[in-house]
Amino acid sequence: MHRRTLIALLAGSAMGGVARLAADQPAEIRISAKKFEFTPNKVVAKRGQPLVLVLTSEDRIHGFKMPDFAIRTDIVPGQQTRVNLVPDKAGSFAFFCDVFCGDGHEDMDGTLVVEA
Ligand SMILES: [Cu+2]
């Protein structure tokens, strides 16, 4: 019983160290696009934490637009599009496809949630 508690504490502190290290590194967030959705379509980050959005497409060219952070790029099949971002404000911010890709295009969107 006591031994188990000790191991749990040690594991907990080791993981804490990893988390602190990770906080200094850009967090990679992978988002995949296809007709007519982004996966994941909800991403959670922390204010001030550097992010790299790694965007890929499974089928055709899509767009990725997030007006609140002045981001706009194409997502081309077979390529990784990397977007650097340091969210400097908390809240919920929409992103969406801005390259017409078919009948469901208008619903192709998602949310970046930035926690304070
Ligand atoms: Cu589209």
Image (spheres, rainbow, N blue to C red):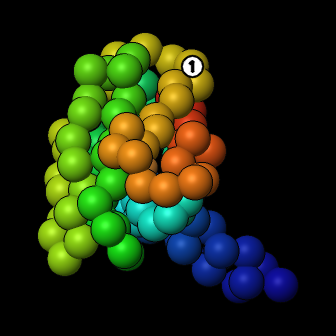
What residue did someone put label 1 on?
A: 91
Point out residue 35 in the picture as x, y percentages from the top left corner: 50, 64
Examine the rendered structure and indicate whether residue 32 appears above or below residue 26: below
Using the image as rendered, state which of residue 49 and residue 105 is in the foreground.
Answer: 105
Point out residue 97 in the picture as x, y percentages from the top left corner: 42, 43
Quarter-of-image position of residue 113:
top right
Residue 102 seen from this side? yes
Examine the rendered structure and indicate whether residue 27 appears above or below residue 116: below
Residue at the spot 54% in from the left edge and 71% down from the top edge: 10
Say how many tags the image has. 1
Examine the rendered structure and indicate whether residue 88 appears above or below residue 27: above
Examine the rendered structure and indicate whether residue 68 appears above or below residue 18: above
Residue type marked 1: Gly
Query: Under tag 1, what secondary structure?
Result: strand
Is the shortest distance between ligand 1 and the CB of mark 1 under 8 Å?
A: no
61 to the left or right of 29: left
Using the image as rendered, state which of residue 28 and residue 35 is in the foreground.
Answer: 35
Crowd tier of the residue under label 1, counting other residues whose Cα lies within 10 Å: few below 14, some 14–19, many 20 or above = few
Using the image as rendered, state which of residue 56 and residue 45 is in the foreground.
Answer: 56
Residue 29 seen from this side? no
Using the image as rendered, state which of residue 41 and residue 58 is in the foreground.
Answer: 58
Task: Looking at this view, name the residue that lies furthest to the front.
Answer: 103
8 to the left or right of 47: right
Point out residue 28 in the picture as x, y percentages from the top left corner: 30, 56
Point out residue 4 in the picture as x, y percentages from the top left corner: 73, 84
Residue at the spot 71% in from the left edge and 85% down from the top edge: 3
Q: Quadrant of the N terminus?
A: bottom right
Quarter-of-image position of residue 8:
bottom right
